[in-house]
Image (cartoon, rainbow, N blue to C red):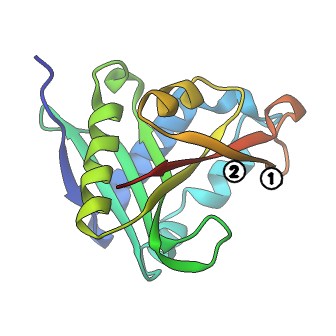
Amino acid sequence: MIKEPRYKICSEGDIPQILKIYNQSYIEHYLYLWTDHGENYMKTNFTKEKILSEMNEDDTQFFLIYHEELPVGILKLNNNKAIDKTRDTNYLEIERIYFLKEASGKGLGKSTIKMVEHLATNENKKVIWLKAMKSGDAVKFYEKQGFVVTDQIDLSYPNVKDEFKRMVLMQLPLN
């Protein structure tokens, strides 16, 4: 039987743990995407100042994901953010969902998507949406959870390898 993860809403005091999981999971899963092994992306996005700035944005929420009492993942949600970046109370964006390699294959991703669905349904959202690398396994995972590809975009970050610039926008319509 899979033990369900526990979710903790993050505050400023959790930033060191968020950064630790961000950096470790990024190193474990995403360095192959970059010509500089993700160095510029991580230096720009994985800082205390950047996380604090994101935490202070309206409608943004971070969660630490625990499995067997150990922090193994991070979830970042943007409430009321539509796909076209406008404010729309019908939408919930999953901006980041990172897990440490040791947590992979334990059903935590599926449980986390179900938790987000529950949250969104309780807040009367119509759609959960996210971006995923077209070339990765994530698209198949999200499709199994009910998401559908609705569009494609190219990443504009410097140092992304050309073959990995394409991303898909995916939506999960809610009843």
**Looking at the image, residue 149 lies above or below residue 119:** above
Q: Amino acid at mark 1?
A: Tyr
Badge 1 density bin: few <14, some 14–19, many ≥20, Cα 10 Å = few
Cβ–Cβ under 8 Å for marks 1 and 2: yes
Q: Residue at x 44, y 36 (%)?
A: 146
Decide if residue 98 is on the left or right side of residue 13.
right
Residue 38: image location, x then y, percent: 70, 40
Mark 1 and mark 2 lie on one chain; the one further toward the N terminus is 2
In-front residue for pair 114/53: 114
Report, in whole angstroms, how far the alpha carbon at label 1 lies from the one at label 2. 8 Å
Badge 2 density bin: few <14, some 14–19, many ≥20, Cα 10 Å = some
Decide if residue 43 is on the left or right side of residue 127.
right
Answer yes or no: is residue 94 visible.
no
Q: Which mark is residue 50?
A: none
- Which residue has dot 2 on it? 41
Decide if residue 13 is on the left or right side of residue 69.
right
Residue 74: image location, x then y, percent: 37, 48
Q: Which mark is residue 157?
A: 1
Quarter of the image where the C terminus is located: bottom left
Q: Amino acid at mark 2?
A: Tyr
Q: Residue at x 44, y 41 (%)?
A: 98
Q: Residue furthest front?
A: 175
Answer yes or no: is residue 19 visible.
yes
Q: Residue at x 20, y 50 (%)?
A: 7
Residue 105: image location, x then y, percent: 35, 18
